[in-house]
Amino acid sequence: MKNTKKNKITDYFENPIFKIIMTVYIVAVSAFISYLTSKVYYEMLWPNERTAVVIFMTISILIPYFYMLFTKVSGFKTVLLYHFILIFTAVIMLMPYEYRPYIAIVMLTVFFTNLSVGIVTNAGICGFAFFSMASEPEFFFTIIMLLTGTFSCLMASRGSKKIIKYSGALALVVFNMILNGVFRIYCDEVYIEYEKISFIFVGTLGCIIGVLVYLTVELVYERFIEKGTSPYALKQMTQENYKPLKYLKSKSISTYYHSKEVADIAKECAKKIGADEYIAYVGGLYHEIGKVFGSDYVNEGVAFAKKNQFPREIVDIIAGHNIKFGVAKSKECAIILMIDTGINAYNYYSSKKADEFEAKDIFEKAIMSRLVAGYLDKSGITIEEYNKIVKTIIDAREKKVEALGGKNGD
């Protein structure tokens, strides 16, 4: 019941009329906050000058909103995350340049969405800072913010290992110091107030604060809020020493290799349509875990997953990837259902008719049958996404056949 209510709430944010109303509200709020920020840094301006400043500031800070709106980020997450970006950007701009932890905003944006959204958000924040004249000389500080922010987005990529993140945090601080050092050399004869050698440390404290804020929020979110479905927890399920995975390999190596193939393709499909690639990969890895127990493999797999405290999303994939037991209720589950259907159909017909059937035709016919029968209706997959998934599956399978010298793999 609780999940049903949650789905109904999030569905409102996907309604086109609601999106239009929300966009009007977002633009108005953004313009209002831009106006208040301009009043802080421009106490005296002619009305037409202030109007121009506010317009440019508003356009800049709206860039991440419209990018999220027209990509695959959910409407609910877009609205929630944009309010965070807007409010905290305005607050941070009130702080002296050297103390601004603005990179925390872009890193958290990457954490909750993806790398491209983080980079676009960084560009929007830099534009907002530039037009708000929040720093002097604003052009050079904006360049430093843009470069440091882009580096921080790469560091915060959810696929990064912990050791890479920690070493990346140190590299980020050093990188910021180098940029400010270059600026200090340039300013040696231009801006008297920035001549001191200590200027290379300007912004360092802000970098450190930003990184600490990001790492703290990430840790709290993964351990106490998202729990089982966090990238950290899902990654543990892919480790060779993870007991359920070791059990699968020891009981049925063929099922393991089939599941690994499905998982690899599922991850690529999820990337193509903006679904959760981590859930898709782990779901593919364990979707047929029940086959090691007997013929009733779906129910056995669900029971095994619950016993081992698998995340709910992975349990749903194990239960929903087989059409005999229901329909796909998520995009990740739909992806795995489509891949499993296509591979099984291809293996079956190719074993009987050798090379008479082309892989593309077999995939398309088998997967189309699932679409027509309504097994994908509740997954949220659009026709455009469906076509992208089918193409990705076909490309991946054909590459495997080529790698095997034209022979069909199991």
Image: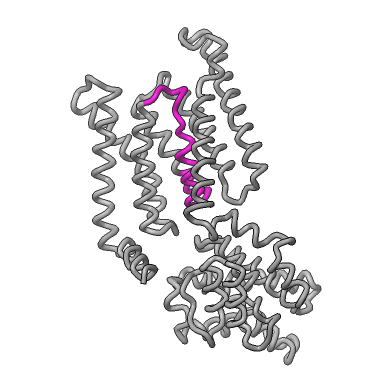
Q: Pick the residue in front: 331 or 288.
A: 288
The magenta region covers 95-120
Left/right placement of residue 113 relative to residue 49 reads right
Q: Pick the residue in front: 169 or 40.
A: 169
The answer to whether 216 is drawn above or below residue 257 in the figure is: above
Task: From the top left corner, tell me how far across and down residue 373 is, in percent.
Answer: 47, 87
Task: From the top left corner, tell me how far across and down residue 320 is, in percent.
Answer: 52, 78
Q: Is residue 96 magenta?
A: yes
On-image quarter of the N terminus: bottom left
The answer to whether 66 is drawn above or below residue 53 in the figure is: below
Name the residue at 48% across, 51% down.
112
Task: From the top left corner, tell me how far across and down residue 328 is, in percent.
Answer: 49, 77
Query: Chief secondary structure of the magenta span?
Result: helix
Q: Most extreme residue toward the right, as rendered?
A: 405
On-image quarter of the C terminus: bottom right
Q: Is residue 63 magenta?
A: no
Name the residue at 67% across, 42% down.
163
